[in-house]
Image (cartoon, rainbow, N blue to C red):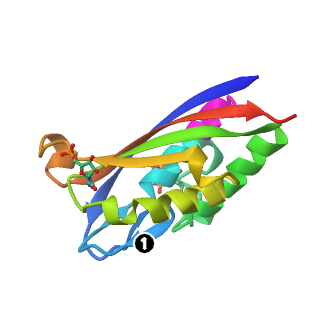
């Protein structure tokens, strides 16, 4: 038995914020804003996992009106949701993610992100792919107003 899910998220750039993507801090002049640490990629992966198990979305589980989740570490949110995935009897098949950012250049950080995502999903790095694209300066990502990401996840029923 297999289940598929997809996720998409966007966060806006702001000054004086760390840039956290995929559970790591990336050196850059600006960061992303949100109620949490605004880790756009981990939110996307969390939504993809929730989609695959038919459990709604990240905002339903962690409302942005709840002070408990103010400045939340998105890795902790994903770990919590991954326990739900595990409890429902599923494990990762594979996940493919795309970060949509004009800047910064993500390629130096992709392998570190991939390793961290695999660790959070209790999987081997070979089951995780992370890539990046610009939008050729078009649209809100192209104007460097924010970063978007998308992911498709395949879950497999455990034996
Ligand atoms: N923020 C980004 C965006 C892209 N890359 C890498 O550059 C390649 C070319 O990007 P295009 O948008 O021009 O197709 C892309 O395949 C990535 O390898 C990146 O590192 N960081
Ligand atoms: C993670 C949560 C909760 O802190 O806040 P944000 O950082 O604003 O992220 P978003 O992707 O808008 O959705 C989920 C939120 O409820």
Would residue 89 be found to the left or right of residue 100 on screen?
A: right
Vertical side of 77 occupied by 92: above or below: above
Question: Who is closer to the viewer here, 8 or 15?
Answer: 8
Q: Is mark 1 within 8 Å of ligand 2?
A: no
Q: Residue furthest front?
A: 126
Residue 136 lies, in percent from the top left, at 13, 43
Quadrant in the rendering for residue 67: bottom right
Vertical side of 102 occupied by 138: above or below: above
Name the residue: 64% across, 62% down: 76
Residue 63 lies, in percent from the top left, at 58, 50
Residue 127 lies, in percent from the top left, at 60, 45
Number of numbered labels in the structure image? 1
Would residue 45 be found to the left or right of residue 53 on screen?
A: left
Secondary structure beneath dot 1 equals strand
Name the residue: 70% across, 25% down: 2
Vertical side of 25 occupied by 146: above or below: above
Residue 35 visible somewhere in the drawing: no
Q: Quadrant of the N terminus?
A: top right
Name the residue: 54% across, 54% down: 65
Q: Which residues are magenta?
A: 48-55
Task: Inspect the magenta stretch and tell me whether residue 35 lies in it.
Answer: no
The chief SS type of the magenta part is helix
Q: Quadrant of the C terminus?
A: top right
Q: Residue furthest right?
A: 159
Which residue was labeled with disc 1?
25
Would residue 138 be found to the left or right of residue 9 on screen?
A: left
Would residue 86 be found to the left or right of residue 104 on screen?
A: right
């Amino acid at each position: 038995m297999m289940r598929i899910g997809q996720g998409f998220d966007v966060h806006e750039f702001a000054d004086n914020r760390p840039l956290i993507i995929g559970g790591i801090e990336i050196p850059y002049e600006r960061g992303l804003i949100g109620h949490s640490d605004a880790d756009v990629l981990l939110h996307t992966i969390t939504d993809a996992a929730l989609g695959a198990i038919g459990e709604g979305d990240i905002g339903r589980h962690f409302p942005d009106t709840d002070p408990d989740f103010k400045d939340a570490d998105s890795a902790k949110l994903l770990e919590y949701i991954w326990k739900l995935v595990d409890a429902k009897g599923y494990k990762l098949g594979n996940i493919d993610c795309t970060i949509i950012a004009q800047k910064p250049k993500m390629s130096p950080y992709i392998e570190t992100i991939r390793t961290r995502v695999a660790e959070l999903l209790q999987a081997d790095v070979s089951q995780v792919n992370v890539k990046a694209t610009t939008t050729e300066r078009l649209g809100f990502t192209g104007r460097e107003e924010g970063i978007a990401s998308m992911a498709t996840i395949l879950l497999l029923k455990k034996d």
